[in-house]
Amino acid sequence: MKTKSLIVAAAALLIAWSLPAVAQDETCYIDVTGQADVEVVPDEIHYIIEIKEYFEEEFDGKSKPEDYETKVPIATIEANLRQALERAGVPDEDVRVQQVGDYWRVRGLDFLVSKRYDITLTDFAKIDDIIKNLDTRGVNTMYIGEMKNKDLPELIDKGKAAALKDARRKAEYMAEALGVKVGRVLRVTEPGGSYGYARNVIAAEAKMLSSVADVAGGSYDQVKTIKQNYTMNVRFELVNPVDE
């Protein structure tokens, strides 16, 4: 029994000595980043309009700010906006007040009330209809906010898969240049988080339009699609053909 125990102990020691040698035989690998772009037309568009009280004298072309005295109340501007939305065919349930605020005209003299509306649209053409019917006096800003598409979850999967394929393609042509081949996948990471993209979230190309003139001029044409970029980092094993 004593001899048998010594044999077992010797075998265990031999295995322990051999482990470092195995660890030193590191696997050769290559790290690549795959990317893919996905573009889709939104089926839900949030159009933001902020209205603000103003003075009639602002538009007479001769009065100075210190002479302004005929203030147009927010209720009047809001009624005009509601009428414009109704003429454009936007139902009341698709219009909600997002924010209310106050703006000082001259410190200690007066303040101007503002309201911001979030209008849900399904077609960019509705923006033209709204602008045609809207009295832009009292409109402070208008811009395209968040854009959505009901098929986005499926597009996320397709985008990540395409980014992984792009990573393998890059790894293969770099490995070929080195005279080796791509082997198994050792690691996959998503730098953009759980959705696998680092930029261009849902409102990807919805750049803020700084003035009413920008909107009226059709500047929103450049933001009519949701564009997303998916990035995946992949580590591939490199295999020497002669070792296969």
Image (cartoon, rainbow, N blue to C red):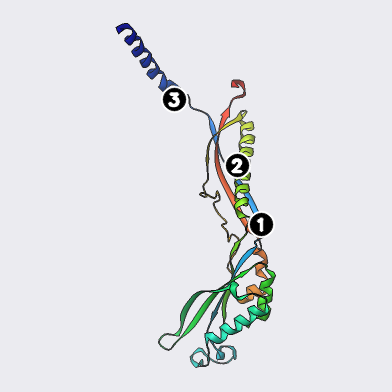
Q: Which amino acid type is shown beneath numbered disc 1? A: Val
Q: Nearer the viewer, mark 2 or mark 3?
A: 2
Label 3, residues with CA under 10 Å away: few <14, some 14-19, many ≥20: few
Q: Which amino acid type is shown beneath numbered disc 3? A: Ala
Q: Tag 3, which secondary structure?
A: helix
Q: From this view, report whether residue 114 is shown above or below residue 25.
A: below
Marks 2/1 in contact by CB < 8 Å: the verdict is no
Label 2, residues with CA under 10 Å away: few <14, some 14-19, many ≥20: many
| Label ID, residue 25 | none
Q: Which residue is mark 2?
A: 164
In the image, 18: left or right of 209? left
Whole-angstrom CA distance, mark 1 to mark 3, is 48 Å
Q: Which residue does the image show at 56% across and 88% down from the upper left?
A: 58
- Residue 127 point in image, percent of width and height: 66, 72
In the image, 55: left or right of 24? right
Q: From this view, report whether residue 90 is shown above or below residue 201.
A: below
Q: Which residue does the image show at 64% across and 52% down from the upper left?
A: 38
Whole-angstrom CA distance, mark 2 to mark 3, is 29 Å
Q: Tag 2, which secondary structure?
A: helix
Q: Which amino acid type is shown beneath numbered disc 2? A: Leu
Along the line of sight, the residue nearer the viewer: 61 or 8: 8
Q: From this view, report whether residue 12 is shown above or below residue 201.
A: above
- Residue 66 point in image, percent of width and height: 48, 91
Q: Which residue is mark 1?
A: 40
Q: Which quadrant, please, contains the C terminus?
A: top right
Q: Tag 1, which secondary structure?
A: strand
